[in-house]
Amino acid sequence: MRKNIFGFSVTIIFVIIFASCAFGFIRDGAVSGREGLSFSSVAYQFDYMYVTIRNRNHSNVNFGGTMIFLDRNYREVARADIPNLKIKRNSSRRFRGVFVKGSGHEAASASHVIWEF
């Protein structure tokens, strides 16, 4: 009887943990069109996402735009807007983007990422 209760409680805990979060894959890469900027640590949720932008330039830059997620046939599956904020020189900043098309599930399944400024 005791083993059944323990097994049932462990199963319930796993279901709650996996049902509560919707994080996707983590991607890294350079921001095309912006010299010295790169992105990493992309975490997807259903209606928003987090991305870390690194500035390797020796000057402050303003960054903001749209991440467009494409499938393997280069069709748009999701789009996320990132607000325009300042990144100090030789540092990084965590941005919160909001999905205006698609969701985190579609963005996690994308094969390519392009930027629109």
Image (cartoon, grey):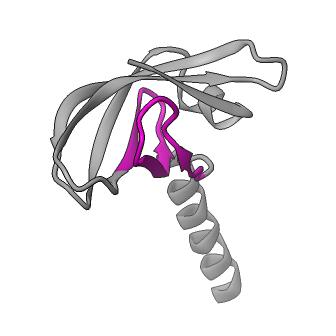
Residue 34, located in which quarter of the rendered image? top left
Residue positioned 64% across, 66% down in the render: 11
Q: Is residue 63 left or right of residue 46?
A: left
Quarter placement of the C terminus: top left
Q: Is residue 38 left or right of residue 91?
A: right
Q: Residue furthest right?
A: 73
**Image height check: is 105 above or below 80?**
below
Residue 97, located in which quarter of the rendered image? top left
**Image height check: is 29 above or below 62?**
below
Q: Position of residue 20 (x, y in %)?
A: 47, 48
Residue positioned 65% across, 16% down in the render: 77
Q: Is residue 30 left or right of residue 96?
A: right
Q: Position of residue 30 (x, y in %)?
A: 53, 45
Name the residue nearer the viewer: 55 or 22: 55
Residue positioned 60% across, 73% down in the render: 10
Q: Which residues are magenta?
A: 26-53
Quarter placement of the N terminus: bottom right
**Image height check: is 78 above or below 84?**
above
The verdict on residue 96 being magenta is: no
Q: How many marks?
A: 0
Name the residue nearer the viewer: 54 or 68: 54
Q: Position of residue 51 (x, y in %)?
A: 40, 45
Residue positioned 51% across, 59% down in the render: 17
Q: Residue furthest bottom?
A: 2
Name the residue nearer the viewer: 27 or 25: 27
Q: Position of residue 22 (x, y in %)?
A: 53, 44
The verdict on residue 45 being magenta is: yes
Q: Is residue 6 left or right of residue 91?
A: right
